Amino acid sequence: MVLCKSLVCSLFLSSFVLFLSGCATSGNLPVPEQEAQTLLPGHVSLGGSFSYANSGAANTLSYYDQSSPSVTSLNLNMRTGLIKRIDFGLGYSVAATNEKYYLTDYGKDTLFKAERYSALFLDLKFQLSKSPIKFRRPFLSLAFQYGYSTKDNGTDIVSIPLRMGLRINNYFQAQLTEKMEYLSIRHPNHYLSSNGYQSDILFRNNLALNLIASLLEPGKDVWVPKITTSIGTQFDMLHSNLFSMYYINIGVSVDSPYLFED
């Protein structure tokens, strides 16, 4: 048990070092976030957030072309506790992308591309640490998430977020998120047929630091508003010149009256 905890702590420390190094060179990409602690059965949380992402350095698309994308998105989410230490969530995002292309083979010519798309996410989260969560002691959760985006003729996203949280007191908590993602992106392939598509496969890694502040102390008959801030980096695991981005997320949520555990 001690060995397992040591390995998990080493994983998160390594991820945090990568996160800091990525912050020095990368850009942003909005990623829906959530708390590491699961909701109690019947407990409900509603929230929304605004995300901004940008790539500080150009991403190489081909031998000639480069791009520097930025993304803004509005995210809505809902969660509810199913049974003890397991909850379920739904998320919906509307995003707009502005991308600048540099045509290096034609000198300084640039093109601009704007795109709007949406995404739907659902996930199941398991709290690995026992309840109740104690103050100033790290706790873990693991989730399985599926998402579908209308970007690029349809993109399937399967991710496994691992979160380590730390409750300072009844009002403040911090957490570190390590999320591995598998993406299947559909593109038209006119060599197959007039309506043919092919899928490109990407493996992506997300690292994020989240700070959560409760404006009220949880209790019976009390709806608790919260403010969440997140900063993170996202990069392609197979191609270092693609999808290397930063993101920042600011959100608000409200939790239904707290259900005390036995």
Image (cartoon, rainbow, N blue to C red):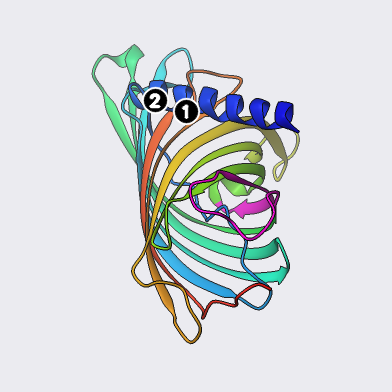
At which x and y percent is residue 103?
Answer: 34, 20
At which x and y percent is residue 90?
Answer: 61, 65
At which x and y percent is residue 14?
Answer: 53, 22
The structure residue drawn at horizontal position 38% and vertical position 35%, both measured from the top left corner, is 246
* Quarter of the N terminus within the rendering: top right
Judged left or right of residue 104, residue 200 is right
The answer to whether residue 9 is seen in the rendering is yes
Q: CA distance from mark 1 to mark 2?
A: 6 Å
Badge 2: residue crowd in 10 Å (few <14, some 14–19, many ≥20): some
Q: In the depicted view, which residue is nearer to us: 181 or 79? A: 79
Query: Which amino acid, mark 2?
Result: Leu
Q: Which residue is mark 1?
A: 16
The correct choice, above or below, for 30 with respect to 134 in the image is above
At which x and y percent is residue 187?
Answer: 63, 38
Secondary structure at numbered mark 2 = helix
Magenta-highlighted residues: 127-150
Are discs 1 and 2 less than 8 Å apart at CB?
Answer: yes
The correct choice, above or below, for 25 with respect to 247 in the image is above
Judged left or right of residue 82, residue 19 is left
Judged left or right of residue 168, residue 10 is right
The correct choice, above or below, for 230 with respect to 243 in the image is below
Q: Quadrant of residue 48?
A: bottom left
- Residue farthest toward the left in the current orientation of the protein: 108
Q: Quadrant of residue 55?
A: top left
Badge 1: residue crowd in 10 Å (few <14, some 14–19, many ≥20): some
The structure residue drawn at horizontal position 59% and vertical position 30%, both measured from the top left corner, is 9
Q: Which residue is mark 2?
A: 20
